[in-house]
Image (tube, rainbow, N blue to C red):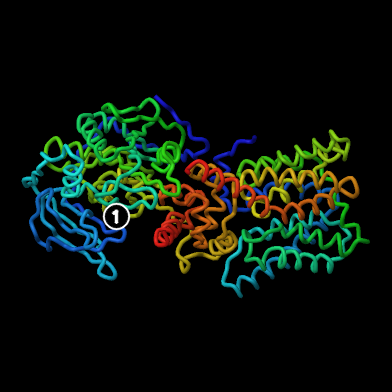
């Protein structure tokens, strides 16, 4: 269990994106170094599209938005291949941000992470472009994100523990490639940003553990049949869909326990 | 002695509380009784502006619930009676002066009926609050248990132990009287190693840990949870001292011990002052150079106020940080930062919520239920066990933008209406 870092928690209120953005700085630098300035162009384009949609929805609904669009743009920009056709990115991020987030009422009311929806859209729709590959991120590049997200309480350690427990169980059964997954920065990026996203994951402690277990199980199984990135994306998608159900289970147990305790 | 250690909790570092081992006497010229402290009051005034009152004189009572009586805590002259919207009662200001205090007849206080009648007559009855719903109980109600809160874990709160120790006689006498009000147990909740002297028949329990270890809701959850039918009362330690003082002397205890602390002060101080004291007068001469705001209560759930609230034992003087100026005074950079960082206002779950939540409560589902006014779900998630103060820490960690205590109050009113 990683203790909460009070100083970090003060720095970043629950809706703040500072830990998430700071945590992405090192992976960004790494990809920039590996492939050059194309990353900035992609992220800039994605961000422009996202902000455009956010402004439109904010105008129509009289609502506000925060910096979550920047996190989403960086995540998608990082994970797509350098040669991606830009029109595909525009289409996919529009789908992701509108259907994945804005139609539900914006950040905090969505049920899936918009980047996950975007990547799933890309992997499904443009199978020939190799969207499932993802960059090679070293493990150390995710250390800041690990510390920042867990320390600020935005990523819950129960989800991480559940996922690792599932993967360990799978590897004991002889399924999957545990060292391969655990040694990959890409897997940790998905675990920290997609599976443990505070909004798209379960919102009760028992639910979070179950969410992590489910994500780990699905990611481990999917990884045996495809790339790490597509395994993470579809595991996060499925686990996110089941998160409200897992929460409902935790709520039912809480209610039963209360009625037994109080008569 | 039993000690309960609270799991979770958050120790906020917002400055040093005052040292309660010494008290400074500071009597302001004016005091006020506030309508805010009596939710749902239907006032019937017993005095007019300009009237001379002595400590113990009835000022106003509730039209429908005569047990709710506001009584002058000090002698003096009524200088101002302010009405709020829809003929509600806003405040009554008294200019304190020397004068003989009213003497109450305490001879019948040995029986439950006599004690209740005395407490109602002296205006001390409204010190009791029920759980569920946080109301003043009816005079014929019988609680299943009674909780005395002799611990305070709110940030900057004064330590109750030395305050009680200096008035051990009155406190013990008050505790003994509480035994007459219930056939159930009387729990005395205190910090570990800080147990006040208590007469036989009182059950002391120590609560260890950071806030919310000192809230009555936490104690009730651990010792006597209110289920579908349960009903308990709780009362603060200074109110118990007040009851003991009344029984000892026949006069009201016209004093209130208030911890004055916060980063806007030159130095924190523990003040012996009057109930409803003018906070501006208390803070005069003690402020630093910066603009401040004065809260009656703690930094997490105090309210900006001129006068000390009923049952409040602390006042917080906080430096006024102008995070972003008013919209029309913002520069473009400030405006941009504000525009980018304000978020949707939706609840974003965080591990801190579980830490700050009252015990046994799933915070995110409960906050979502009260945010949309879903009383049925809130009840099933344990809202009956809660009062506004239990959710103050959650509001604080969410940046103070959503007032969860207020949302809970509204949900509880809905629940109470349908029960």
Question: Neighbour class for label 1 at 10 Å: few (<14), some, many (≥20)?
Answer: some
Instruction: Work out which residue is located at the far left of the displayed protein and give it.
Output: B100
In front of the other: B152 or A80: B152
Q: Can you tell which quarter of the image residue B198 is in?
A: top left
Q: Is residue B166 visible?
A: yes
**Residue for point 69% across, 70% down:** A52
Q: Can you tell which quarter of the image residue A174 is in?
A: top right
In front of the other: B371 or B304: B371
Image quadrant in which the N terminus of chain A is located:
top right
In this picture, residue B103 sits left or right of residue B69: left
Instruction: Work out which residue is located at the far bottom of the displayed protein and give it.
Output: A60
In this picture, residue B24 sits left or right of residue A95: left
The chain letter for the residue carrying disc 1 is B
- The relative height of residue A236 versus residue B256 in the rendered view (above or below) is below
**Residue for point 76% across, 52% down:** A236
Check disc 1 and report the residue beneath it: B37
> Which structural element holds mark 1?
helix
In this picture, residue B252 sits left or right of residue B339: left
Where does the image place residue B191, in percent across and percent down from the top left? 38, 31
Where does the image place residue B301, in percent across and percent down from the top left? 40, 50
Where does the image place residue A78, in percent across and percent down from the top left? 79, 54
**Residue for point 46% across, 47% down:** B393
Where does the image place residue B336, in percent across and percent down from the top left? 58, 63
């Amino acid at each position: 269990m990683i203790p909460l870092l009070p100083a970090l928690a003060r720095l970043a209120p629950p809706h703040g994106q500072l830990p998430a953005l700071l945590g992405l700085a090192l992976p960004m630098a790494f990809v920039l170094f590996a492939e050059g300035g194309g990353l900035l162009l992609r992220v800039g384009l994605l961000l422009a599209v996202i902000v455009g949609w956010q402004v439109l929805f904010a105008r129509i609904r009289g609502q506000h938005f925060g910096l979550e669009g920047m996190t989403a743009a960086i995540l998608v920009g990082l994970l797509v291949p350098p040669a991606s056709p830009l029109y595909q990115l525009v289409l996919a991020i529009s789908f992701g941000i509108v259907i994945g987030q804005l139609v539900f009422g914006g950040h905090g009311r969505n049920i899936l992470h918009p980047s996950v929806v975007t990547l799933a859209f890309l992997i499904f729709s443009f199978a020939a472009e190799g969207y499932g590959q993802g960059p090679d991120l070293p493990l150390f590049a995710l250390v800041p994100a690990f510390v920042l997200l867990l320390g600020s309480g935005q990523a819950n350690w129960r989800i991480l523990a559940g996922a690792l427990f599932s993967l360990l169980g799978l590897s004991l059964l002889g399924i999957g490639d545990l060292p391969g997954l655990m040694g990959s920065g890409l897997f940790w990026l998905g675990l920290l940003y997609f599976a443990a996203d505070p909004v798209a994951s379960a919102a009760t402690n028992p639910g979070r553990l179950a969410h992590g277990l489910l994500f780990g199980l699905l990611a481990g199984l999917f990884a045996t049949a495809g790339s790490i990135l597509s395994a993470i994306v579809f595991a996060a998608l499925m686990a996110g869909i089941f998160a409200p159900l897992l929460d409902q289970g935790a709520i039912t147990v809480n209610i039963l326990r209360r009625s037994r305790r109080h008569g | 002695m039993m000690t309960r250690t609270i799991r979770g909790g958050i120790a906020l570092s917002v400055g040093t509380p005052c040292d309660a081992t010494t008290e400074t006497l500071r009597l302001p010229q004016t005091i006020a009784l506030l309508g805010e402290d009596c939710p749902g009051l239907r006032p019937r005034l017993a005095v007019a502006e300009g009237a001379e009152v002595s400590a113990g004189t009835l000022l106003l009572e509730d039209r429908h619930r005569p047990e709710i009586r506001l009584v002058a805590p000090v002698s003096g002259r009524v200088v101002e009676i302010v009405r709020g919207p829809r003929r509600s009662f806003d405040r009554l200001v008294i200019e304190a002066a020397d004068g003989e205090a009213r003497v109450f007849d305490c001879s019948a206080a040995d029986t439950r009926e006599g004690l209740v009648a005395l407490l109602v007559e002296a205006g001390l009855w409204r010190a009791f609050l029920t759980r569920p719903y946080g109301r003043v109980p009816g005079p014929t109600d019988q609680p299943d248990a009674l909780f005395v809160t002799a611990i305070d874990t709110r940030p900057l709160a004064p330590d109750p132990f030395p305050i009680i120790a200096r008035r051990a006689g009155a406190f013990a006498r008050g505790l003994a009287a509480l035994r007459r009000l219930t056939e159930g147990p009387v729990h005395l909740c205190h910090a570990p190693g800080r147990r006040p002297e208590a007469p036989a028949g009182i059950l002391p329990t120590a609560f260890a840990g950071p806030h919310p270890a000192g809230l009555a809701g936490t104690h009730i959850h651990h010792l006597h949870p209110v289920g579908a039918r349960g009903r308990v009362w709780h009362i603060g330690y200074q109110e118990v001292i007040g009851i003991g003082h009344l029984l000892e002397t026949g006069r009201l205890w016209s004093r209130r011990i208030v911890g004055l602390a916060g980063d806007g002060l030159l130095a924190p101080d523990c003040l012996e002052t009057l109930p409803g004291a003018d906070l501006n007068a208390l803070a005069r001469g003690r402020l630093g150079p910066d603009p401040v705001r004065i809260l009656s209560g703690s930094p997490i759930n105090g309210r900006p106020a001129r006068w000390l609230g009923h049952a409040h034992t602390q006042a917080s003087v906080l430096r006024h940080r102008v995070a972003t100026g008013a919209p029309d005074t913002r520069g473009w950079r400030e405006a941009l930062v504000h525009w980018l960082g304000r978020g949707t206002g939706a609840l974003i779950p965080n591990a801190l919520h579980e830490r700050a939540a009252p015990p046994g409560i799933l915070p995110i589902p409960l906050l979502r239920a009260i945010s949309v006014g879903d009383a049925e779900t809130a009840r099933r998630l344990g809202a009956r066990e809660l009062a506004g103060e239990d959710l103050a820490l959650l509001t604080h960690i969410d940046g103070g933008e959503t007032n969860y205590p207020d949302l809970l109050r509204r949900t509880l009113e809905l629940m109470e209406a349908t029960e």
